[in-house]
Image (cartoon, rainbow, N blue to C red):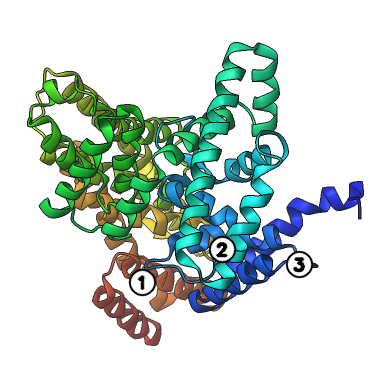
Amino acid sequence: MPRTPMMTEQQPTIRQKLASYLAQLPQPTVLKLASGLERERLRGTAGLPYEMILSGLRPLLASFTGKRPGAPDAVRQFCRPFEDLLVDVDDEGVRQGRISRASVMRVWAWLEDDLMPDALPDLKKRIADHTLKGDDIALRAAVAVMHASAAAAIRAAIEEARQDAAKRKQAEKRLGGESGFEDAREIASVLSVAPAMLQLQAELPKRIDDFGDEMVGILKDTYEELSDASATDALYLPFAVMARLKEPSQILRFVRKVAHQRNDMIISRCDLSVFGEHLLADMEQIAGRAEALRPGHADLDVLLGDVRRFAHLSKGFAAEIDLRRNGEWGQRLLAARARLSAAISQEMSRFETELVRAFPFYQFGQYGRGGPMRPDLAKAPDPARIERVMACLRFVNGVMPISEPLGAQSHCRSIRQQIDAYLASYEDRLLEEMRVARGTARSNAQEFLEAAAGLHETIGENAQAEILRRRGQVAARG
């Protein structure tokens, strides 16, 4: 049935709702659902929106550890060689070794409709038949033919498009723009070395906590064997492994092994320098995002995640190779640290203001600005301001352990001392007010005290929070 305009308009909303629902499912249910859908699609069962549901499941499946069960169809077999390189969103632009998930089905449709309209349907049928029959040998042969044929077809089409502006424009339109065109080129490169990629996937864990000598050796041997035939395509082997590393900077262990060097000034000029460039680019982009934030409007939990990632990358980068301060990489790393440190300091400079807004004082008496201060209990605490202060405290507490290599240690310590001093003063005076306050003021005072206790709990000071609550109970009885 043709889609009506209303159906087309509703499609994104339906997908969003479906993705939200699927994200709530437990892992066993997700695996069972994916496996069942794949098998029914292989059997040719009609009437289900397979692609819509599976597209919502793929990001979840990618996050799971261990071997994924199920009966992979032709599309999943098509993706297997480059599955480690897939990213949900690539906001940082085209980058070698990263392929947007959104590009996969565009490239597949391009193959089905334009590049392999006769061969691909036959290959899909063979793959489905061999999978359902459990004929692993015939299945591997059919999948290998699909990978090789698709790589050749995409490469030929891309080469033709590069020589003809009109065809280039048409291909980019079909593939979602220049980034989609580049994704297609990378997919072809990976598919051209699919046997080596699949072999490496089988030999290495899906999640690598520590990239030890044995695993480095496996990658080195596979890479060097492949690089004799195609050095450019062989780079996708370490890119795939890098995506599996808990600490991405450990890919430099492989670079050192191949280059037989630890010196960054030499490594930065070899063929594998792209991996150091990737790590530096990630750190520079984190610093750039932090610089672009409007102070007081940032999501501090997201920023803290970025700062932690920067610290891990920076520490790992410096640990894996010998950086020279006067070298290009050393200079870039120092510059990125300085930019991030400045952004962190600028953001934290507002934290005391946030605290004063959430836990306000007012002056009384005839002494002007130097007069006595009392907690302002005219209004109950503002939940949004309290939550903002909690985020500020979580941020300071999270940054403190990693502030030294970022050059922000002094500022973090100063801000934390200011916050602690203000809170201590506020709590003491709040307890004094609780002894005499009545009615609404008493109720508001109790809410402020609970909010202050919540701040202590936010940073793990549970004992201090409990002591404050007990002091509040005593003050209320007075």
Query: Quadrant where the N terminus lies?
Result: bottom right
Q: Relative to 158, is 391 above or below?
A: below
Q: Residue at x 63, y 43 (%)?
A: 108
Instruction: Decide which of 306, 321 is in the foreground and name it.
Output: 321
Q: Amino acid at mark 2?
A: Lys
x then y, percent, for residue 351: 37, 46
Count of numbered labels shown in the rendering: 3
Residue at 59% x, 44% y is 102
> Pointer 1 and pointer 2: residues touching (CB < 8 Å)?
no
Instruction: Report which residue position mark 2 lands on.
Output: 379
Q: Between disc 1 and disc 2, whose residue precedes?
A: 2
Amino acid under label 1?
Answer: Ala
Q: Determine crowd level at label 1: few under 14, some 14-19, many 20+ residues with C-alpha closer than 10 A.
A: many
Q: Is residue 448 visible?
A: yes
Q: Which mark is residue 453?
A: 1
Measure the C-alpha gap from mark 1 to mark 2.
Answer: 18 Å
Mark number for residue 325?
A: none
354 with respect to 30 (left or right)? left
Category of crowding for the residue at label 2, using alpha-carbon neighbours closer than 10 angstroms: few (below 14), some (14–19), many (at least 20): few
